[in-house]
Image (cartoon, helix red, strand yellow):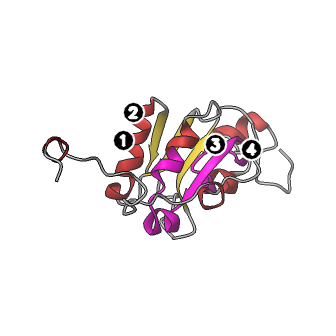
Amino acid sequence: MSANSKIPEDKHLQSALYGTPKVNPDEQRRYLGTFRERVCLTVSIEELTQDEWTQGFAKEIATEQAEIIFFNGNIDQSKLRSYILTATKSGVNFTIKTNPEYRTNPDNLAIVVASKKAIYVQTVDIAKKHQPDQAGDQSAAPKKKSFWSRLFKS
């Protein structure tokens, strides 16, 4: 240790005193504990509250790149319920992160779908990759006739 410095120069001693240094801690906080190059889909808290994205989410987690899902556990669980059920049905592993460093501002992320290795997908925002689900649009599906209406045609 030098005479002018109070910080020990030995890396082993530094990591024992201050903890293991993290690589890109701001990026890891932004993407709920993972690196950007592993991310294949993100849903912000604002997008989560504005639209329903479960169909686009289901399509994305069906790909082979989607190996793990991170949910921001600091937001209301009722907003995440349909996404957690979809992830459970698909069999993809997921983690709910409740660390206080994961914020709940509208621009923070609510859901991150990632790979365990670097894949680097250019567009990861769900609003740019998929259209919001149209839950109220029933006109596209043909209406089935009941048994009685088929039996007694009028």
Mark 3 or 1: in front is: 1
Q: Is residue 147 magenta?
A: no
Amino acid of disc 2: Lys
- Whether residues under marks 4 and 2 lie with C-beta atoms below 8 angstroms apart, the answer is no
Taking the image as shown, residue 15 lies to the left or right of residue 72, namely right
Instruction: Identify the image quadrant of the N terminus.
Output: top right
- Whether residues under marks 1 and 4 lie with C-beta atoms below 8 angstroms apart, the answer is no
Per the image, the residue denoted by label 2 is: 89
Taking the image as shown, residue 117 lies to the left or right of residue 43, namely right
- Classify mark 3: helix, strand or loop: loop
Query: Mark 3 or mark 2, which is nearer the start of the sequence?
Result: 3
**What is the CA distance from the residue labelled 3 to the residue labelled 1?**
36 Å
- Classify mark 2: helix, strand or loop: helix
Amino acid of disc 4: Glu
Write the residue at 15% across / 41% down: 151
Disc ID at residue 37: 4
